[in-house]
Image: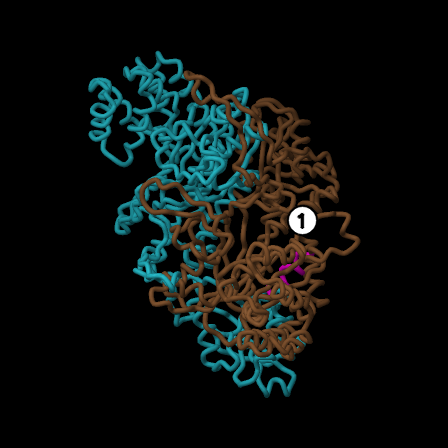
Chain colours: A cyan, B brown
Amino acid sequence: MPPFGFLHMRAWASLFGQLLRSPRAVCIREVHFHSQFAEAVLTSHLKPQQEKTNFIIKTPKGTRDLSPQQMVVREKILDMVVGCFKRHGAKRLDTPAFELKEMLTEKYGEDSGLIYDLKDQGGELLSLRYDLTVPFARYLAMNKVKKMKRYHVGKVWRRESPTIVQGRYREFCQCDFDIAGQFDPMIPDAECLKIMCEILSGLQLGDFIIKVNDRRILDGMFAVCGVPESKFHAICSSIDKLDKISWKDVRHEMVAKKGLAPEVADRIGDYVQCHGGISLIEQMFQDPRLSQNKQALDGLGDLKLLFEYLTLFGIAEKISFDLSLARGLDYYTGVIYEAVLLQTPAQTQESFNVGSVAAGGRYDKLVGMFDPKGHKVPCVGLSIGVERIFSIVEQRMKTFGQKIRTTETQVFVATPQKNFLHERLKLIAELWDAGIKAELLYKNNPKLLTQLHYCEDMGIPLVVIIGEQEMKEGIIKLRSVASREEVAIKRENLVAEIQKRLSES
Amino acid sequence: MPPFGFLHMRAWASLFGQLLRSPRAVCIREVHFHSQFAEAVLTSHLKPQQEKTNFIIKTPKGTRDLSPQQMVVREKILDMVVGCFKRHGAKRLDTPAFELKEMLTEKYGEDSGLIYDLKDQGGELLSLRYDLTVPFARYLAMNKVKKMKRYHVGKVWRRESPTIVQGRYREFCQCDFDIAGQFDPMIPDAECLKIMCEILSGLQLGDFIIKVNDRRILDGMFAVCGVPESKFHAICSSIDKLDKISWKDVRHEMVAKKGLAPEVADRIGDYVQCHGGISLIEQMFQDPRLSQNKQALDGLGDLKLLFEYLTLFGIAEKISFDLSLARGLDYYTGVIYEAVLLQTPAQTQESFNVGSVAAGGRYDKLVGMFDPKGHKVPCVGLSIGVERIFSIVEQRMKTFGQKIRTTETQVFVATPQKNFLHERLKLIAELWDAGIKAELLYKNNPKLLTQLHYCEDMGIPLVVIIGEQEMKEGIIKLRSVASREEVAIKRENLVAEIQKRLSES
């Protein structure tokens, strides 16, 4: 995809152009550069009359504050992701942070224990949402919506053991895109994969591959290998761990913990080592055992059609049919996929393993679980692992020592003399009212040097200077922080001149 | 403020220009126009093998989904609010949805009972945040930040009795701007009031007034009226209700429920009826009782200085010194303020009472409550009541029958013939890769009329049509949905031509 890559390289460069400080604006003060997990033992001052209590001031386990630097990176990345969702015609939806507890039960398989419940304070039993997919399905069923292409950006909460180094937290942001409705097969599914490619190419995170499989192929594979149907979900959960632990450990879990016969496990082992392109699909059609299974054949047929569309979209070479891909969640019914970044040797020095950065699949029965009459609304969608992407970009910026402007202030209002607060306040109000981003120091009589240093520190490009001489002459001095050049401007032309300069820069 | 008002009238017109559909694109289909509180009794299909359970499919009490229409209005309003915060040099911060429970205790006075607690699932005791101010103070103390101008847009949760008609929910969005740090008096405070004026004028919600008072004046007033110091907070909470219930009811609460002597209550009653401008401040300086109280004099002195700065900012006429303003929250220590919309007779037909739409004040001791050594960081800030603003704008759009585009799709890819899916897929991938917002129907062989109707329904301005004839001639037809004009374009010029048309429109 050379033209596509080129376009997005420019977009990315412009993103970083906005993120990075002008190289001429030096003397950067490093404020708020702290560990998010710094803890300080604190003597409470809340009850001065009672005995003092010791408590630790921190954010809850597995959560963190996001500093202004982090928020700038996040906003730029989210803008790109949301821009792609809008390019594909999605509407935005929002749902509450918590749901009735019963809405979330039996949707997440072995992960259900990770759901945060709210305390029973009289009233309904509530849980924090675990993903954005189940609330979407609940929304569709509740409002009897049969067709919808929506995106949702929001926080979700999971009580996982936080492994902070990998960018995993108990509170994290998800960016989901889903297509609900009965359509001709594989067209929306192919669009979901196209979206994943556009976003991952656009963010220039390095080379990636999207693994694709189908739940029906997995189920068919389990059946022909001799897994009892009651164990399908449990074995699927084990297979899902193959990207984190070895086949040997997965096999041990299936045999020792989940009671699978060793020879059945070995038959599965033969299949899950297979991955490839369209030719592997053809090969599996010929597989003596798999070709006897109706479900597997349905899945293989759909995958073949999917690859046809992916070829038309020009992304087939990014996709790998991978029989080891399982996806842990219970609700998937058809195609499933997961994008992973490929670590090239040059990048291993970053020693920063991030694994899956986007994933999704088809879930045709989830909406029906909420509908009074069990009416189904077929759905397919994807979730971008933005937290991991944030981590990678932050890590990279740290590696390259890149600094970020955390404010957008365009003009600073300064004075070299005492007793000019009133003039500064009148002047800055004029700028604000004209839509110009402006700041001043909250001091009656600040030193000029302090004011100019502030501009350099914060990367503010322009300074308006007003003093006795300027007042007398009815002018204002306009100073460029980078070049240190000053020009005199008639007071009444100030706003127009600033707007002209800003539009040129 | 004529120039200011003018500018923002244009901004608002442009906001609505974006929100509104082109009048020529008719036939609007009303999808997802449903009650957010629709409930359906549902037979659970979760446990098909067990007996079926009845449950109700709904969002938790006091919460709601936000439809694409609502999200569009929200995003436009939030963009304006955040734009103003950035214009004043604020950085963005984010904090977790929940805090350690002990971080929130003794901050909210009588409202503490409204905090949502999380269930004890082993580990820390957690609560959902109740506002964005206490997490900000916790952040400053935890990271030893002494100076920061930040904004925060996020959800907060309160277990209030939901009165949905007024736009009050248990989950709602807050937009906060705060200035932390030791500065010369009243300069940041005046900027906070300026920001409130800019936002409320900019959103053109009608005339408004900002009531201003000072906690020290209130405390001084209580002292000179004879309120025992132990009852200051409780009486303050009662006074805070004056905008919702009558003086008679407030007096009854103070006397009957809070044990205040009737004559003390009556003395308070004399004061809380006073409101006015700078002249009222002068009058209170002369008040025989109040002028004997050190705290009250400090408060009055600061208010006088504040009005001086507000005059320089050109907003003094929007501000009313109001001795009945109390603000319920415990943590305020100085200036407090609250903006209310003024209902003009012409508007009363809307019969839509919204009350306070923005509020804030000075809280100089909150950070010290978190700091191990009690080090204080003086703060002043404001919160925009965006939920009420959303309600007003939604109500208004409903009244005027205004429709909103919920997608941004620019081009639709259509075909008049069968078996053109492959060509449509290749074509749309080309558009997406060029950054053009494009859609097609997920059908192998859709009817042309269905495709054109979809464009009219969704307000999509351009249609690209490809069929046998076009293929043969190496062209594409480009159709304007509004004018129904079609032109033939060479296939290789399509992207450039679309980009040209879109940049012109």
The residue under label 1 is: B393
Whether residue B463 is visible, yes or no, is: yes
Left or right, B268 with respect to B128, comes to: right
Residue B290 x/y as whole percent: 60, 75
Query: Most extreme residue toward the top, as rendered?
Result: A292
Which quarter of the image is occupied by the N terminus of chain A?
top left
Whether residue A504 is visible, yes or no, is: no
Residue B4 x/y as whole percent: 68, 65
Q: Is residue B106 above or below residue A436?
A: above
Q: Is residue B200 magenta?
A: yes
Count residues near mark 1 (Cα–Cα under 10 Å), then give few for <14, some for 14-19, many for 20+: some
Q: Camera-side residue: B434 or A419? A: A419
Residue A304 x/y as whole percent: 42, 23
Residue at screen point 59% across, 37% down: B491
Disc 1 marks a residue whose amino acid type is Val
Q: Is residue B156 magenta?
A: no
Which quarter of the image is occupied by the C terminus of chain A?
bottom right
Residue at screen point 51% across, 54% down: B110
**Residue A262, quarter of picture:** top left
Residue A261 x/y as whole percent: 22, 18
Q: Is residue A134 above or below residue A419?
A: above
Q: Camera-side residue: B343 or A278? A: B343
- Helix, strand or loop status at disc 1: helix
Q: Camera-side residue: B320 or B288? A: B288
Secondary structure of the magenta portion, mostly?
Answer: helix
Residue at screen point 59% across, 75% down: B300
Magenta span covers which residues? B194-204
Left or right, A46 with respect to B187, comes to: left
